[in-house]
Image (cartoon, rainbow, N blue to C red):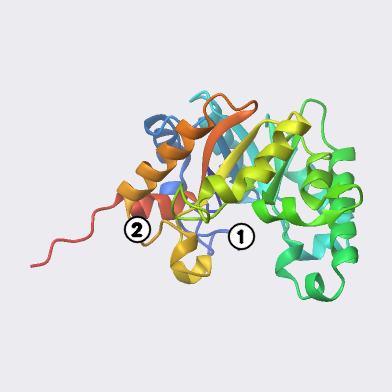
Amino acid sequence: MWMWDNPLDRSVDARGTAYAPADPATLAAFVQEHHLTTVHLAAPWASDEGPVAAWLTDAIVAVRAQGASVGVLGGDPPWLGQPELAVQWMRAATNGRTVDHVQVNVEPWTRPEWFTDRTGSVTRWLALLDAVRAELPPGVGLGVDVPYWLAWEPWGDGTVADAAMARADRVEVVAFVDHAHGPDGILALSADAVAAAVAAGLPFTVGVETDTPAVAGGAEWTFGDDGLAALLTETALVRDAMAGTPGYEGVAVQHYRTWRTLLTPPPTPS
């Protein structure tokens, strides 16, 4: 699961998102109830300073106490031109904390340059991953979010997905679709990226979305308008189809706040 929120009010810390269920105890209970094996916790800038520092440390400890692995999660567009900023963020996020990985979520494909300078965009992204990887603390791996279609994007002797995975220790294959089967389903769309992860010998998950259609870019890309039953049914189909695939670790849900929204029954009409 990706988690982008924290419980701090902005009046206490400007980096706060004021999402009360992100407190360590509530988060730990959610991890236990849903048998989560991996959680990516968003670490704001300079996360070893101020009120957010204590929250992040406590949240990491609470999640690890449930037996789940924990990664610190982050990514800002300026890092593409200044990878030293990503390294600075990573050092603060891992400072004095026991984490399993650093999950880098920087998306050059959302920038205008992707359409005007594809080669430069990919080069800067890969250089960013190299910079962070080179400075990771001992025993901490690099996790990378890789959209399924990057396995169709040529790069060198392979694809952009291949190049990113060559720099990673784990990968989230992002397949934000709201159904498992069919030519436009999660399994078909993610197949080439999954094959790349298997070839690279990486542990991987397949990511799905639960935010609103407006955020996701359309109803077909998210379970946010489909409800909890659809999320559980379709991800179970993915699980069953991929059982036994080398490196497969399950389905990853984007993200904690919106997943909890699906779990909340709508109000009963009066």
117 left or right of 179 in image: right
- Is 131 or 26 nearer to us in this picture? 131
Determine the residue positioned at 70% across, 32% down: 198
**Outermost residue toward the left in this view:** 270
- Vertical comparison of 76 with 188: above or below: below
- Is 36 or 6 nearer to us in this picture? 36
Q: Residue 151 at x, y = what percent?
A: 73, 50
186 left or right of 90 in image: left
- Is 95 or 164 nearer to us in this picture? 164
Residue 100, picture quadrant: top right
- Vertical comparison of 8 with 242: above or below: below
Between disc 2 and disc 1, whose residue precedes?
1
177 left or right of 190 in image: left
- Report crowding for label 2: few under 14, some 14 to 19, many 20 or more residues within 10 A (C-alpha): some
61 left or right of 50 in image: left
Amino acid type, mark 1: Arg
Dot 1 lies on which element?
A: loop
Q: Residue 140 at x, y = what percent?
A: 76, 30
Is the C terminus in the top left, top right, bottom left or bottom right quadrant? bottom left
- Is 63 or 148 nearer to us in this picture? 148
Q: Residue 145 at x, y = what percent?
A: 68, 48
Residue 41, picture quadrant: top right
Amino acid type, mark 2: Asp
Q: Is any part of residue 138 visible from this angle?
A: yes
Dot 2 lies on which element?
A: loop
Determine the residue positioned at 83% across, 55% down: 154
Determine the residue positioned at 90% across, 52% down: 127
Which residue corresponds to mark 1?
A: 15
Q: What mark, if any, has residue 226 been given in the picture?
A: 2
Determine the residue positioned at 71% across, 56% down: 75
Q: CA distance from mark 2 to mark 1?
A: 31 Å
Q: Is any part of residue 49 visible from this angle?
A: no
